Image (spheres, rainbow, N blue to C red):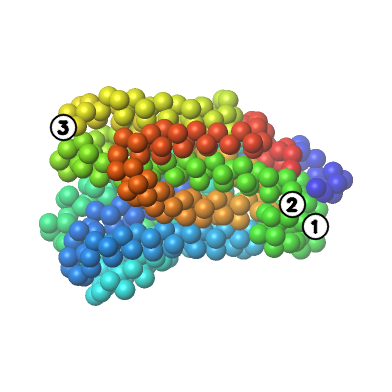
C-alpha cells in the first residue's frame, strides 16, 4: 500500500457525484441489465421456433446452451482487465453495443452454426454488462447507498424476463421470431446512446493519472502493484487471493444449487409435479414479479448488517425454504407448488444476488476491481454449466427427484457459508478505508 504521504488526505478527496447523476447512472445501469436479461430470455422463449426453422435437434439445443455459457465465460474474462486498463465507461458502452449489433444479426441467420456463433458473441457481451455496471456503481456511490442502488440495478433481471415475455406474446404472431430479434435491437441502441452522458469513474481516472506520473493519487492506491498485469495481482497478492477464493467458492456452491431451484425448475414442475406448461409459466411469472422487490430489499438489508453477513443468513434460510417446498408441494396441486416456491424464489434470487455482487465489487481495490469482478462472473458462468451436469448426474444415479432436491437444493447451499472466510466489510466504509 502506498505511504499516506503519497496521496491527499480523505477530506480533500473529490466529492461524490450529485444525487441526480447517481439516479441517472442507476437508471441506465438498470435498463442495461434488464436488456441483457431481455436478450437472454428472448433466446429462451424463441428456442422452439428457431430450432424448427433452422432444423437443429434437442441435443444441439443443449449444446447451444453450453456455447452461450462459454461465451459469457470468455467475455467477462476479457472485459474485466480492459476495465482496469482502458476504463470503465468505454467498456460500459461496448458491452451493450456489441450485444445490440449481434442480436440484430441473429434475425438473418440461416443455419445452426451461424445462430450459435452470434449467440456466443451477443449473450457473452450482454453478460459483461453485469461487472461493468457493478464496478461503476461501486466507485461512484456514497458508502451508505452502494448496496441499495445496486439492489435496484439487479432488479433489472426479472424486469427483463417480464419485458421479453410480454413482447413475445404480443408480437411473435405478427412478426415471427426473426422480427423479435430486430425489435430487440431498438432498446439496446437507445440505452447505448444514453450512456454517452455517463462519466468515467473518478477513482479510475485518478489512478490512471497517478500511474502516468501526472499527479499524486487523490485516492489511496498501491502504485507499484497497480503497474502489474491485473490477473497477476489477483493471484500473487496474498490478501487479494484469499478474498478471491472465499468469494468465488461461495458463489460457485450457490450457483450449483441455483440451477436446480431456478434454471431447471420449469421442467421439475411439469415432469414431477404434473403441472401444465402454462401453470409452470404462471408460477414463474408470479414469483419473478414478487421477487423483483427482493433485490432492493436485500440491498437495504445488506447495507444495515453487512453484505457478507446478509449472504450468510441467506445461506441458512434458503435450504430451509427448499425443505419446506419439498415437504409441502404436492403433484397436481397448483397452489401447493406456487405458495412455497414464491419465498424460495425470493431468497434464492434477491437476497443472494444483491448483497453478493456488491460484496464482490467492494472486496477488491480499484486497481483490480474490474478484473476481479469479471473473474468471479466467469466462474459463475462456468458454475451454471457444471450445475446442469450435477443435476443430470445426481438425478440419473439416484433416479429420485426428492433425493436430488435434498442434495442439491437443501444440503449444497449450506456450503456457501464459506463466505464467512471472507472479510467482514463495514457497509459504511469508503472503498479506500477497506484494509488490503
| In this view, the mark in front (3 or 2) | 3
| In this view, the mark in front (3 or 1) | 3
| In this view, the mark in front (1 or 2) | 2
Q: Between disc 3 and disc 1, whose residue precedes?
A: 1
> Is residue 39 visible in this depiction of the protein?
yes
Q: Quadrant of residue 312?
A: top right
Which residue occupies 86% across, 46% down?
3
Disc 1 from disc 2: Cα separation: 12 Å
| Residue at mark 2 | 237
- Is disc 2 placed on a helix, strand or loop? loop
Q: Position of residue 62 (x, y in %)?
A: 31, 60
Dot 2, crowdedness within 10 Å: few (<14), some or many (≥20)?
few
| Residue at mark 3 | 332
Disc 3 from disc 2: Cα separation: 55 Å
Which residue occupies 29% across, 43% down?
399
* Marks 1 and 2 close (CB-CB < 8 Å): no
* Residue 378 placement, left or right of 340: right
Q: Quadrant of residue 155?
A: top left
Residue 224, numbered label: 1
Q: Between disc 3 and disc 2, whose residue precedes?
A: 2
Q: Between disc 1 and disc 2, whose residue precedes?
A: 1
Which residue occupies 33% across, 68% down?
116
Amino acid at each position: 500500500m502506498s505511504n499516506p504521504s503519497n496521496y491527499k488526505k480523505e477530506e480533500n478527496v473529490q466529492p461524490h457525484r450529485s444525487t441526480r447523476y447517481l439516479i441517472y447512472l442507476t437508471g441506465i445501469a438498470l435498463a442495461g441489465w434488464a436488456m441483457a436479461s431481455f436478450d437472454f430470455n428472448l433466446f429462451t422463449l424463441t428456442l422452439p421456433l428457431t430450432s424448427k426453422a433452422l432444423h437443429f435437434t434437442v441435443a444441439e439445443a443443449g449444446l447451444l446452451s453450453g456455447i452461450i455459457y462459454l461465451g459469457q465465460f470468455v467475455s467477462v474474462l476479457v472485459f474485466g482487465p480492459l476495465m482496469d486498463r482502458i476504463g470503465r465507461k468505454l467498456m460500459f458502452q461496448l458491452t451493450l453495443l456489441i450485444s445490440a449489433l449481434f442480436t440484430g444479426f441473429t434475425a438473418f441467420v440461416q443455419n445452426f452454426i451461424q445462430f450459435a456463433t452470434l449467440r456466443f458473441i451477443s449473450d457473452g457481451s450482454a453478460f459483461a454488462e453485469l461487472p461493468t455496471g457493478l464496478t461503476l456503481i461501486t466507485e461512484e456511490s456514497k458508502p451508505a447507498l452502494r448496496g441499495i442502488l445496486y439492489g435496484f440495478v439487479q432488479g433489472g433481471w426479472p424486469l427483463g424476463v417480464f419485458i421479453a415475455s410480454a413482447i413475445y406474446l404480443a408480437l411473435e404472431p405478427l412478426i415471427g421470431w426473426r422480427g423479435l430479434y430486430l425489435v430487440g435491437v431498438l432498446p439496446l441502441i437507445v440505452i447505448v446512446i444514453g450512456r454517452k452522458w455517463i462519466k468515467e469513474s473518478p477513482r479510475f481516472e485518478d489512478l490512471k493519472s497517478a500511474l502516468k506520473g501526472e499527479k499524486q493519487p487523490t485516492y489511496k492506491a498501491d502504485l507499484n502493484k497497480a503497474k502489474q498485469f491485473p490477473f497477476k495481482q489477483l493471484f500473487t497478492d496474498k490478501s487479494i487471493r484469499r478474498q478471491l477464493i472465499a468469494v468465488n467458492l461461495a458463489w460457485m456452491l450457490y450457483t450449483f444449487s441455483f440451477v436446480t431451484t431456478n434454471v431447471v425448475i420449469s421442467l421439475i414442475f411439469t415432469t414431477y409435479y404434473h403441472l401444465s406448461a402454462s401453470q409452470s409459466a404462471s408460477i414463474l411469472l408470479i414469483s419473478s414479479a414478487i421477487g423483483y422487490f427482493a433485490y432492493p430489499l436485500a440491498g437495504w438489508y445488506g447495507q444495515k448488517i453487512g453484505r457478507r453477513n446478509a449472504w450468510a443468513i441467506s445461506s441458512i434460510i434458503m435450504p430451509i425454504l427448499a425443505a419446506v417446498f419439498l415437504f409441502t408441494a404436492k403433484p397436481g396441486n397448483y397452489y401447493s407448488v406456487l405458495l412455497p416456491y414464491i419465498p424460495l424464489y425470493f431468497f434464492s434470487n434477491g437476497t443472494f444476488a444483491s448483497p453478493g455482487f456488491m460484496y464482490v465489487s467492494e472486496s477488491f481495490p480499484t486497481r483490480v476491481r474490474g478484473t476481479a469482478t469479471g473473474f468471479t462472473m466467469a466462474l459463475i458462468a462456468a458454475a451454471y454449466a457444471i450445475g446442469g451436469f450435477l443435476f443430470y448426474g445426481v438425478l440419473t444415479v439416484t433416479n429420485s427427484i426428492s433425493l436430488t432436491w435434498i442434495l442439491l437444493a437443501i444440503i449444497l447451499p449450506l456450503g456457501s457459508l464459506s463466505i464467512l472466510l471472507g472479510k467482514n466489510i463495514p457497509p459504511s466504509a469508503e472503498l479506500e478505508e477497506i484494509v488490503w
